[in-house]
Amino acid sequence: MRQHQYEPEVDVKARSRAARTRMPIVGTALLAIAGVIATVAAGCGGGAGAAPKITTTARAGVAPVPPDQGAYFGAWVPAEGAGLPSASPSPSGSPSESPSDSGSPSESPSGSQSPTPSGKDAGKPGMAPVLDFEQKLGRRLDIVQSYRGWKSDFPGGLEKSVADGNRYLLLTWDGGDTREIVQGEHDDLIAKRARAVKALGKPVFLRWARDMDKSSGQKGVHSAADFVAAWKHLREIFKRENVDNVAWVWCPTARGFSGANAGSYYPGDDQVDWICADAQPGADYDYRDLSEALKLFMEWSRGRHKPIMIAEFGVPKSYGPRRAEWLREAAKTLQDPQVKAIVYFDSDEQAKNARDKRRSYSVTGDKHATSALRELATTPYFNPRNLPVTSGG
């Protein structure tokens, strides 16, 4: 293994290293000119090479920090049966909660049982679907995502299993009413959850109240100012409980930068460790590259000295034979020096019904899409810990 999983790192130097490996040998004068151009580009905030120097408030070696080079690769893999479309999805459109404590082998939508995963994590609560997905990818995940409701108890079986291994946990925690939070009505609940996360004793990405910019959630969010106040209140309670193994991930929708003023919900550089966007292409498009979905978010992010996480990105089944093409283009887009983590949304649970292919993202049963996702996941850029790669399942 090239580096320890939790090796401290704050300043990112991948841009200059990558540039040196791509450029032919040239004279000192040309290198100096290239450096000036890069500096100007960074100041203008455009282009894939225009990443700022990255900083974080997270405690290096204890909370998750960016890899020195490349980006972590992770996924949301729902529990057995939970990734299937429902005729009556939840009003929020939120994914189902984390897999149960069952360690039983996963089943495909057709009902055929997948091969029983093996290894030291086999049989651990909630890990069977994750291990099956990893087998198809041909590598272990860097990040495993879980979802919990605002008043749900956690960590559960999956979170404990992830923390027990050498994968990072991305804990997505739904937000409560922001004004009630600021008024202190949920302080006991927040403190209890803070102590539970601390007790895991491993680095955790905490993504609280993601997609706060969506109009469907404004009843509880109220306003950008209310959200920011609630975010700061949560952080203060976690600080009071001496929780230092958490990296705070702020995550609106990428679409929110095209009209919903998602940037107004930003709590500030001193309050955020990772900036993030949920970046599904959108069901109102017949076909849309990830680069287009991310464009305005990435332009906004150039002004922040933070690592980027792209969470819940996925290619719709409605793209049919072009899914593999989409994923290969996405791999190019995501090899950006400021992007330090990506998380695939391998689920169909947001679909309105079984015929809704525009909101279905799992690659199960699609050998071409699975192969393209495996290519992405095993690209060295997305394997910064140099994990072993197999031929895949």
Image (cartoon, rainbow, N blue to C red):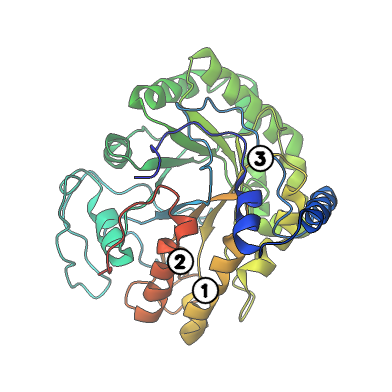
Amino acid type, label 2: Leu
Mark 3 touches mark 1? (CB < 8 Å): no
Task: Say which residue label 1 marks.
Answer: 328
267 versus 256 height, above or below: above
- For the residue carrying disc 1, how many other residues have a C-alpha within 10 Å: few (<14), some (14-19), or many (20+)? some
Amino acid type, label 1: Arg
Q: Is residue 90 visible?
A: no
Task: Say which residue label 2 marks.
Answer: 376
Q: Is residue 129 visible?
A: yes
Amino acid type, label 3: Lys
Q: Secondary structure at mark 3?
A: loop
- For the residue carrying disc 2, how many other residues have a C-alpha within 10 Å: few (<14), some (14-19), or many (20+)? many
Q: Name which of mark 2 and mark 1 comes first in the sequence.
A: 1
Q: Name which of mark 3 and mark 2 comes first in the sequence.
A: 3
Q: Quadrant of the N terminus?
A: top left
Residue 198 image position (x, y, % from top left): 40, 23
Q: Secondary structure at mark 1?
A: helix
Observer-nearest of 56 and 178: 56
167 versus 151 height, above or below: below
Q: Secondary structure at mark 2?
A: helix
Mark 2 touches mark 1? (CB < 8 Å): yes
Residue at image position (33%, 59%) is 82
Q: Please state if 68 lies on the left or on the right of 258 as rendered.
A: left
Q: Name which of mark 3 and mark 1 comes first in the sequence.
A: 3
Q: Please state if 345 lies on the left or on the right of 66 as rendered.
A: left
Observer-nearest of 192 and 312: 312
Q: From mark 3 to mark 1, how far is it between C-alphas?
A: 26 Å
Q: Quadrant of the C terminus?
A: bottom left
Determine the residue located farthest toward the bottom in the rendered image: 321
Q: Please state if 130 lies on the left or on the right of 270 as rendered.
A: left
